[in-house]
Amino acid sequence: DAGVIQSPRHEVTEMGQEVTLRCKPISGHDYLFWYRQTMMRGLELLIYFNNNVPIDDSGMPEDRFSAKMPNASFSTLKIQPSEPRDSAVYFCASRPYRGSHTEAFFGQGTRLTVV
Amino acid sequence: KQEVTQIPAALSVPEGENLVLNCSFTDSAIYNLQWFRQDPGKGLTSLLLIQSSQREQTSGRLNASLDKSSGRSTLYIAASQPGDSATYLCAVQYYGNNRLAFGKGNQVVVIP
């Protein structure tokens, strides 16, 4: 498996524009997570899905953020409208359910810059 | 609040020395703890996962210990090499929760 695949790797956009980040989890993984990493706050969970269903979106900062998982192999994180304070690295991660302890696997991240 | 702390934020060691990285967590209801490595501009690579019922896990030159009573995990890297230079992150999963709570990491430089 190629691992968790995120696109784009880098995104530069102007304030007010819509941004869509994409993620393809590892095949067969039941959980998908979206994290955001900044120097100030480190890694923070935004939302996670179990079998394509959003379970916990308490980390989504505002209504400007939305996430979807239309099928088991694809998820999007959308920011509309974007603001400079949204600049960060956004990671997608997936994890299988095996009834017990399983490792999370991360994508390479999308570095978002909002100017 | 479930907090994960890694101190110091950055450290340098000469090549060949053993690395000792510490992770502290505030809630004893830990399910497991995972150590990750992150290279600049890259994603996170899982190094070790240690379950709450375990006291340590080993993989090659890496050894992670877990002491739930003191709320601490330690990652040992034996005979450090310049290629070990990276940021090491500790992440805790608690019972009843699928999210990982991350520390801010230890940025390590191994000096040749």
Image (cartoon, coloured by chain):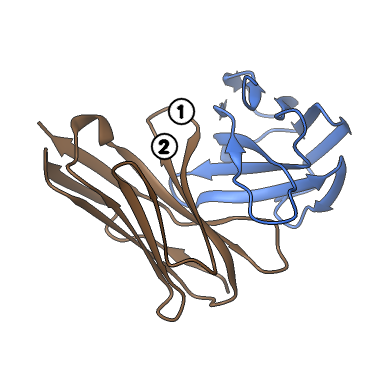
Depth check, front residue: B74 or A106: B74
Element carrying mark 2: strand
Callout count = 2
Q: Residues within 10 Å of mark 1 (few under 14, many from 20)?
A: some
Seen in the image, is A69 located left or right of residue B101? right
Seen in the image, is B90 located left or right of residue A31? left
The answer to whether dots 1 and 2 both sit on one chain is yes
At 70% from the left and 54% from the top, the residue drawn is A59
B44 lies above or below A98: above
Q: How far apart are the two marked residues, 1 and 2, measured between alpha carbons?
A: 6 Å
Q: Is residue B54 visible?
A: yes
At 54% from the left and 68% from the top, the residue drawn is B52
Contact between marks 1 and 2 (CB within 8 A): the answer is yes
Dividing the picture into quarters, in which one does residue A79 lie? top right
Image spot of residue B24 (x, y percent): 40, 68
Image spot of residue A21 (x, y percent): 70, 26
Type of residue at label 1? Answer: Lys
Q: Quadrant of the C terminus of chain A?
A: top right
The residue carrying mark 2 is: B38
Type of residue at label 2? Answer: Gln
Q: Is residue A80 visible?
A: no
At 56% from the left and 29% from the top, the residue drawn is A109
Depth check, front residue: B60 or A48: B60
Element carrying mark 1: loop
From this viewpoint, which residue is outermost toward the bottom? Answer: B69
B23 lies above or below B43: below
Q: Which chain is brown?
A: B
Image spot of residue A75 (x, y percent): 79, 30
Task: Please state the chain letter of the residue tagged with numbered disc 2 in the rendered image.
Answer: B
Find chain A in the image and tell me its colour. Answer: blue
The residue carrying mark 1 is: B42
